[in-house]
Image: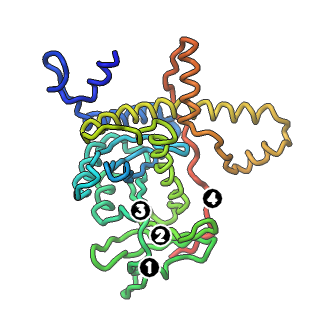
Amino acid sequence: MRQQLREWYWPGQQKKGENRQTLDVTSCFGSLLQWILKLWPDDEYRIALAMDATTLSDRFTVLVISVVYRGTAIPVAWTVLAGNIKDAWKPHWIRLFEHLQGVIPGRLFVIVMADRGLYAKWVYRQIRSLGWHPFLRINANGIYKPRGESSYRHLRSAIAPKGKARIQRVTCFRSNAIDCTLLSWWDEPHEEAWLIVTDIFHEASNVVWYGMRAWIEAGFKDIKRGGWQWHRTRMEDTDRIERLWLVLSVATLWTVAIGSEDEDASLNEAITELPEFHIANKTRKNKRKRQRTISCVRRGFILILVNLILGQVMLPQKLVPEQWPKIMPESEYG
C-alpha cells in the first residue's frame, strides 16, 4: 500500500506494471471547484477567490488560486515553478484561470482578490473575461483621473482620512489605463491605506471585503507548518510536487468542511444554552466577530482522527461560509 501511494505521484514511465499513466493535475482543477460548489449552500450567492504566490525557501514558487473560506483557503488551481530560475508568471496565471473557466454558475457573485505585487492590467481584464469581479490592491505611487475630469492626480490624494472610506469612479493610470471603481480605506490597525480597483459599481462594493484576502496566507500556513508540513518535503521535481498539492488540496477541503460544520454547530449550541441576557448573546446579536481559537483545518483533522480511531469515517457533507464583512465605513462618494 505504501508503495502504491508513493507511485501515485510518479510519472507513468517510472511506475511498475503495464499501461501506467501520469496524472494530469490540471484536469482536476475544475472538479475541485465543482466539489466545493456542490457543498456550497443554496442560499449563499457569493464566493470569494484569492490569487497569490508562496515559496519554499529558494527551491520552489507555487502560484495558487484558492477559494477563501472561514479564515483559511482551499486551493483549486496551482502550478509549481523552480525557485532559482527566472520565469514569467503571466502565462501560468492565464492557464490557471482558463482551467476554471465556466465552472462557477452565473448566479453566483464572484470576486477575485490579489495583493499589490500581482496587480497588472491583464490580470484585471482576465478576471473580467470570466464574468468575475476583480478586487485588486494597487500601489499608491501611480496616477488617476476622476470620472468627468481631464487632469490626472497622484493616487495618494485619493486616500480617505483615517477611519473613512472613499469610493470613486475613475480612470486609473495613464499607460495601461483602466476605467474602474477606486476604493480607499485607512483604518487604525493598518500601517498603510488600502487602494482597491474593481469593476463593481461603487454603491454595491465594500472595501472591507479585501480583508478576506489574508485568508489565503493563513491557508499557506495550514499547508506548511500549521498543518500538513509541506515545508519538510524532500521532493525536487516540480511535476511531482504539483501532484502532491492535489492531495493537500483534497485534505484541506475534507478537514475544513468537517471543522467548519462543527464550529458553526458548537457556536449555535453554546449560545442557545446561555441565558437570554448573557453578554455572549448580546455580542451575537450585534454580530461582532468571534475570535477563532482553533482553525477549521485543525478542528476537522482532530474530529476525523478521533472517528477513525473509533472505526468511523467522517465525510464532508456541506460547507458553512461565514458572512462577508458587513461593516461599511463612513464613505465619501465621487
Say left or right for 34 vs 226.
left
Q: Quadrant of the N terminus?
A: top left
On screen, 39 above or below 178? above
* Residue 140, quarter of picture: bottom left
From the top left corner, tell me how far across and down residue 314 is, in percent: 52, 20
For the residues labelled 1 and 3, the Cα–Cα distance comes to 15 Å
| Chain-order first, disc 2 or disc 1 | 1
| Chain-order first, disc 2 or disc 3 | 3
**In the rendered image, which residue does mark 1 sit on?**
155
Q: Is residue 68 visible?
A: no
For the residues labelled 1 and 4, the Cα–Cα distance comes to 24 Å
Q: Secondary structure beneath disc 3?
A: strand
From the top left corner, tell me how far across and down residue 319 is, in percent: 52, 34
Q: Secondary structure beneath disc 4?
A: loop
**In the rendered image, which residue does mark 3 sit on?**
136
From the top left corner, tell me how far across and down residue 35 is, in percent: 40, 32
Q: Which mark is residue 195?
A: 2
Residue 114 or 129: which is nearer the viewer? Answer: 114
| Chain-order first, disc 1 or disc 4 | 1
On screen, 314 above or below 277? above
Q: Residues within 10 Å of mark 4 (few under 14, many from 20)?
A: few
For the residues labelled 2 and 3, the Cα–Cα distance comes to 8 Å
* Residue 147, quarter of picture: bottom left
**In the rendered image, which residue does mark 4 sit on?**
327
Q: Secondary structure beneath disc 1?
A: helix
Amino acid type at circle 2 is: Leu
